Image (tube, helix red, strand yellow):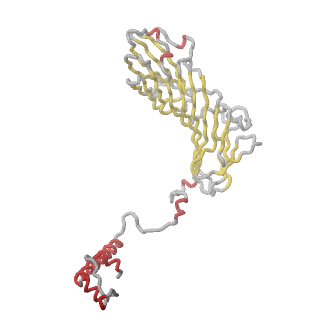
Amino acid sequence: MSTELLKAYVYNEPVAVTGTGGTLGLASPGAIVSGIGLGKLVSGVDKMANALGVEKKVASALEKVPLPGLGERKTVSSSAANKPIAVSGDSRRESEVFVDVVERLTLVLNRAGQVTQSYINGSVVLRSFITGCPEMRLALNDDLSVLSLGLRPVVRGNSSGGQPCLPLDDCLMHECVRWDEASRSPVFTFFAPDGEFTLLSYRISAAYRPPILVHPFLEPTARGLDYVLRVRADFPADRSAANVHLSIPLPSYTASASLETAAPPPADPKAPQLSAGKAELDRRTLTASWLIPTLPGYAEVIFRAKVLLPSNIEASGVDLSEFGPVRVSFEIPMYLTSGVHIKSLDLLHGGKTAPAKWIRNVTQAMSYVARWTESTSPAHVARA
């Protein structure tokens, strides 16, 4: 047994033992035991043996106890952290491609409903669940033109019968895209990497038709005025805008205000009544928040704020320019303002089976503002 292990069980200082003739020499084992004390040494050794025996029994018992949820222990290489995560048993995910064409609108309207500033930021985003990075080919509509690439439309007008496509100012492509500068058709070949990536991103500065129009009116009353907003959806009837939200600031001198929303009755008596949503007023900031859950194409809803003015302000002297800009947010699924659409998406090489393709088009409001500071004819402001 090692001396180092015995040190923890020795409780007195060592005693020096002299050799024969009074000189210091090597001590015999018997002398060492005699100097320390046989009883204390035996007691320390017994304690150490007992402690070691208990530890061995506890360790043996712990080895036999199964750890919950861990099962059999396995050791893996440190390179496992670099391996892709795969869901076992999900074969459906191994042959799917999701494509999102998203357009975000920036637009400024004046009080006459005219556009003073507009552009579109678009992107084509792919999520590929096909193993092996197969070669794919994506084709856009034939009437597409990209000014920065020198790409001119193959045909005039939309071949699918929809609205004509707006010209793209520029188009940025992912590094996996193989593009031939001599190409005259909007066809892009690429090796799709695993996961999500932006295949194309583009920008359009040409004027476009606003999908949602906002028209303001002021109607003076006996004790104040009515601030009226007429909101119209200017896109096909088979589409609907979701979560249309308008932030409507009122003048800082407003004494009080009550809010109302309304929708005209449907032309067809059997059709359900359109919901005009709900408007609430933040009295601290004097800002009305109007939320319309669903707004179908070509539908129209009305917002009315009955504003009570202080006694020193006359309603006839109030102008629309004293009302802050109205900010609009919305999302229109399965609709693109520019007219861009995916004509085809094909798997060329590298895949065992034809993948399931899911294509979604979405238009979103990024910065959609209606301002009333621009001058216009009095016909757009109702007077009593």
Residue 158 place in picture, x, y as percent: 68, 33
Q: In this view of the protein, which residue sits in the foreground, 19 or 279?
A: 19
| Residue with the most extreme left position | 39
Q: Residue at x 50, y 26 (%)?
A: 327
| Residue with the most extreme bottom position | 20
On screen, residue 211 versus residue 48, left or right, reads: right
Q: In this view of the protein, which residue sits in the foreground, 325 or 213?
A: 325
148 lies above or below 368: below
41 lies above or below 352: below
Q: Residue at x 27, y 85 (%)?
A: 33
Q: Residue at x 48, y 9 (%)?
A: 383
Residue 136 place in picture, x, y as percent: 66, 50
Residue 125 place in picture, x, y as percent: 59, 43
| Residue with the most extreme right position | 182
Does any portion of residue 264 appear in the rendered image? no
* Picture quarter with the N terminus: bottom left
On screen, residue 223 versus residue 21, left or right, reads: right
Residue 348 place in picture, x, y as percent: 68, 52
356 lies above or below 22: above
Q: Quadrant of residue 234?
A: top right
Q: In this view of the protein, which residue sits in the foreground, 125 or 255?
A: 255
Does any portion of residue 224 appear in the rendered image? yes
97 lies above or below 31: above
Q: How many marks?
A: 0
Q: Quadrant of residue 108?
A: top right
